[in-house]
Amino acid sequence: MLLFLSVPQPRPPGARTRAGPARVARWRRQRLRLQQLRRLRGLLRGLRGRPRTGSRRRGRMALCGQAAGAASLPSELIVHIFSFLSASDRLRASASCSHWRECLFYPALWPQLRICLRVSPSEQPRLEFLMRKCGWFVRELRVEFAAENYLSGGGGPGDGGRVDTGTGGEEVEALQLSTRWLEVLRTYLELVLCVLVSIRNNRNLQKFSLFGDISVLQQQGSLSNTYLSKVDPAGKKIKQIQQLFEEILSNSRQLKWLSCGFMLEIVTPTSLSSLSNSIANTMEHLSLLDNNIPGNSTLITAVELEQFVNLRSLALDFCDFTAEMARVLTDNNHVPLQRLSLLVHNVSVMHKSLDNMPNDEHWKALSRKSTNLRVYIMAFDIKSEDMLKILKPSIPLERIHFDSYITCVSGAIVDLISRQYDKFLTHFILMNDVIDTSGFPDLSDNRNEDPLVLLAWRCTKLSLLAIHGYTVWAHNLIAIARLRGSDLKVLEVTEESIDFDQGELADQDVDPVHNLIEQVSLGLGQPWHAIMDIESLSVFTEPNRHFYREMQSFSEDI
């Protein structure tokens, strides 16, 4: 048996092996990666301003304009680097050079924009720049208009501080106030036009949200059509805004989230007719909050709601949510509704009837359709007798917010809420903007059965409790903290709302305020103190904005 072995011949000295194509490609990739890393090190060294000592290329590490500087990097690499920066840092970096500015406004870096604007002329140039760069491709746009700087008595540009209330002081103050309202309205219309014009042809828009708390003035009667007629005599700007809004809806191809709250005459009863059937069928969230629609007209009807078969979250004025709408949402061709936010305003209740609201059987059908349905109610100055009609036993109420200026919530309403919604209620907010702070209304007719303590005892899921403008006894506050313990994540009570029992004070040798803070902190398992400055409580100073933001997070948390 012969065995043949193949013995390799020794390679002569100096001979080279021939590399395969794969090995050559891998070597080239490694070389390219090393070159890019060297350029990236140079970029970082230039940004830090500390070039390497003794380097012969020290002069070539400039920030931009040099062959080995930042400008020589590929645009894709620059976009990737700046994807780790915040939005404000990107805007600052865009001032470096034109190449960076082009890269920083690459669509992939700006999938969403969330803007909060003061209604001020100084905001318009910056808004125009940002919307001109991003408006045509942004996928999620949220804009909030805030006029708080103009709402105070001494705010607003050109106000000149406080007004002398001597002879004719009231007339002078009214004149300056009128001038300030006109400036606010004029600027507001220009800013809204700037936003809508920039996105009118955006077909990639998926989420569109607008909020304008300037309409609070109109709800309180401080703003009338007289001001609008002076700013927009023929109504041309208002019509242009409404047409642009309808044009955006008609041009949209991917819109799934539409939210418009407290905007001044931007949504009309015919606006939703601009949506195509395909977009209406795929819409997941719809929010139309405006209680200034005259007469019995509504922003959406039950017939229009039938098209939104994929709707999972809905926010409407309570008077617009009729029994027919509840029936539509229980149809088999609709997906189960999971979030429902309702705004109950005294203006709407005065001009619209509550006779068409859903009864308890409709709420039972909605709950059977979707076991995950949760309801959020915001009530502005609603009488107790009207609230008794609204609060049906079968509503899966998770959050309720009372905000009063004239009327007060009774202890019977609080007791009813704790009895009917003990399995669902997590948020309870009770605000009363009273002028006379010498005596707040007391919810407890009987000291031994305080409705707030019963609320904390019955509602085992309660995680937020905020109170102002109602008397909260110190011993009841301690009982609430002990009942809910660490499950009560937020307990906000203003210092002026807390009262102490004089009989208990006589029996105590310690400081009652210090004892209250200590006992409540022990009950909650975390440091606690009363709210000393009511102006720092946004739920009190800006109830509309607080409700709108909470509604947004409430709807997104599905």
Image (cartoon, helix red, strand yellow):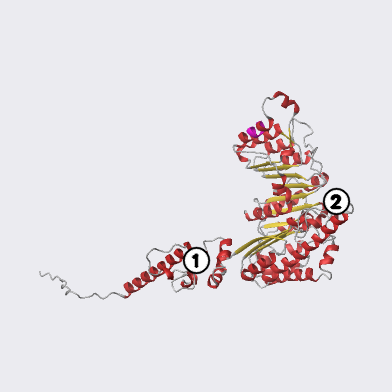
Q: Is residue 219 left or right of residue 77?
A: right
Amino acid at circle 2: Thr
* The C terminus - image quarter: bottom right
Which secondary structure type mostly characterizes the magenta part of the structure? Answer: helix
Mark 1: few, some, or many residues within 10 Å (few <14, many ≥20)? some
Q: Label 2 to label 1, Cα distance in Å?
A: 60 Å
The residue carrying pointer 2 sits among few (fewer than 14), some (14 to 19) or many (20 or more) residues within 10 Å by Cα, namely: few
The image's mark for residue 165 is: 2
The amino acid beneath tag 1 is: His
Mark number for residue 163?
A: none
Q: Is residue 49 above or below residue 15?
A: above
Q: Residue at x 78, y 63 (%)?
A: 183
The reply, left or right, for residue 91 in relation to residue 283 is left
Is 391 magenta? The answer is no
The magenta segment: 515-519
Label 1: state its secondary structure. helix
Residue at the disc numbered 1? 80
